Image (cartoon, helix red, strand yellow):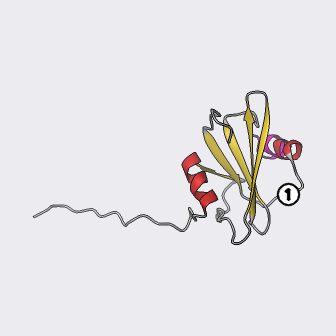
Amino acid sequence: MHPGCTIEQVYLYREPIDFRKAIDGLSALVELELGLSPFASALYVFTNRPRNKVKALYWHRNGFCLWQKRLERDKFAWPRDDTGATKSISLQEFGWLIEGFDLWRNKPHETLHFGAVA
């Protein structure tokens, strides 16, 4: 992303898109299909059907920016549950996703609840 650009929210669009879509098509999808503002301090992230490419759209001061990454091997992990058209993640989680981590398969240690120590 552009240095100094403030991203407050990251939205992953769950369904694969036609990767011929560019800024106009993606910003229209954000506004008309998702009901979100493409001008918000947000990053809108899309993938293709094989999940080897992602596109990220965001607004910076006076114009849209479109960022793309293509994997030569492997696939991006993507949310699997069917609740809603988007999945919100943090900017840090987006960085992990781009690095190849599966955010939905990683599980934290089990939470333990004890009544006493002795």
In the rendered image, the vertical position of residue 41 relative to residue 118, given as above or below: above
**Label 1: few (<14), some or many (≥20) within 10 Å?**
some
Q: Which segment did they paint magenta?
A: 29-35
User: 4 or 96: which is nearer to us?
Assistant: 4
Label count reads 1
Residue 67 is situated, as x and y percent measured from the top left of the image, at: 75, 48
Q: Examine the image and state in which quarter residue 69 appears.
A: bottom right
Residue 108 is situated, as x and y percent measured from the top left of the image, at: 42, 64
Residue 90 in sight here: no
Residue 95 in sight here: yes
Residue 88 is situated, as x and y percent measured from the top left of the image, at: 62, 49
Quarter containing the N terminus = top right
Rendered residue at 50%/66% (across/down): 106
Q: Name the residue under label 1.
A: 19
Q: Taking 31 as reference, is 97 left or right?
A: left
Q: What residue type is labelled 1?
A: Phe
Q: Taking 114 as reference, is 63 left or right?
A: right
